[in-house]
Image (spheres, grey):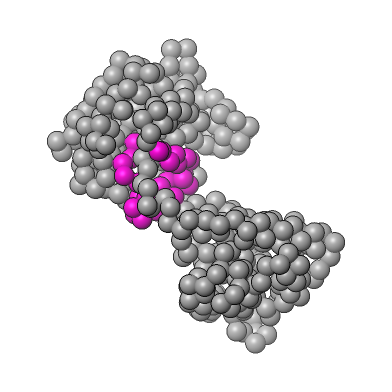
Amino acid sequence: MDEAHVLLLATLDTKAEEAEFLSRHLSGHGIPSCTIDLSLGADGAILGGSEKLEAMEAAASRALETVTEALAGDVRVVLGLGGGTGGEVALRVMRALPVTFPKVLVTTLPFDPRIVVADSSVILVPTLVDICGLNATLREVLENTAALTAGLCRTRRVAGACVASPSIGITALGATETAVTSLVSALADRNQESTVFHANGYGGAALSRFAERGALRALVDLTPHELTRIHLAGSHVPMPNRFSAGADLPWIVLPGGLNFIGLGEETLLPERYLGRPRYAHSSFFTHVKLLEEEMLVVADALAENLNAATGPAALIVPMGGFSHQDRVGGLIEDPALRQVFLDRVMESLCRDIVVTALDAHISAPETTLAIIDTLDDLAPG
């Protein structure tokens, strides 16, 4: 195993033929591999319920111990092959590895992948067909996987680079993209690197993990939209530390995206939202304007998190609009709703936090300048 470049995770009691095929094609690319068995050890018995879950956890623990030891050698990629059960066991191992270490999972994809890969870089390769005997389609998928894995193996990476050079974390959505792009550009002009996280209910999980591992030196939470998903509605992964990870970092908050709820296709909206101002962000997502009582909920939640921060923090409120359609002529424009937010946070903040209310839109140059000035105050250098 010391010379293996790829660790192949597979349940050999059901996927031995396919694992051997993949291993052979890796060898054809000059890539040595070692296969680690994820089988549950049921000896042909059908496990169910808690018994199966315990067996899956045990298999993952055994494999992780082996993988962790092997990483001290020349392993460059961890590659998983599995259906529902084997794929889940492989993912448990992969999620315990360093966040950016190359990981590839070949799977039938019988689950929503966003939840399990929200805070870890896993390349997913859907098989399209079941992994149950080789056929023309599966052979082609496995051959392609061997080729892309070989490419990963030949790319030398610097382990821990993002920790060695912490950057400024920024949260974003399409609805605040102009503001984020302007800020990223302004920081780059000052030779300051930024890392942007999508506040779509899943990116916050990655943000939390990056903050916890020391990859950020400051956070501009320009789009804390996930408060609406956590406290009101919308799809998101559980992320209890979204607003507490890195609580000692310099933290600048703006209410980007707090004026709407991000829901699914417009034709599938629950009836209770149909009477509200809304617009199709894309064919898959609809943004529905918050009610005043909902804005109070997210304002209270944001203030609570700011009050709990241990590092320097500041709040910037662009009273000209919180998102790209919250502007003059915008589809969910509502100046009164912005005032509700500002009044509530001013009442609820109990820490010595500087609140700056701007007569500008979140995407305006004045807002970018205010963020840069505040960043200089909270995190000089």
Q: Residue furthest top?
A: 329
Residue 102 painted magenta: no
Q: Is residue 24 above or below residue 286?
A: below
Say which of 309 and 251 sits in front: 251
Q: Is residue 18 visible?
A: no
Q: Position of residue 171 (x, y in %)?
A: 41, 37
Say which quadrant the N terminus sits in. bottom right
Quadrant in which the C terminus appears: top left
- Relative horizontal placement of residue 147, taking residue 4 as reference (left or right): right
Q: Position of residue 92 (x, y in %)?
A: 51, 66
Magenta stretch: residue 205 in it? Answer: yes
Question: What's the residue at 60%, 84% (across, down)?
Answer: 41
Where is residue 88? Give x, y as percent: 57, 66
In the image, residue 359 above or below residue 266? above
In the rendered structure, which segment of residues is drawn in magenta?
A: 193-221
* Relative side of 98 to 351, left or right: right
Number of numbered callouts drawn: 0
State the image quarter where residue 17 is shown: bottom right
Residue 376 makes an appearance in the image = yes
Task: Please identify the residue farthest to the bottom as the structure is shown.
Answer: 43
The residue at the point 44 percent across, 35 percent down is: 172
- Residue 195's image quarter? top left
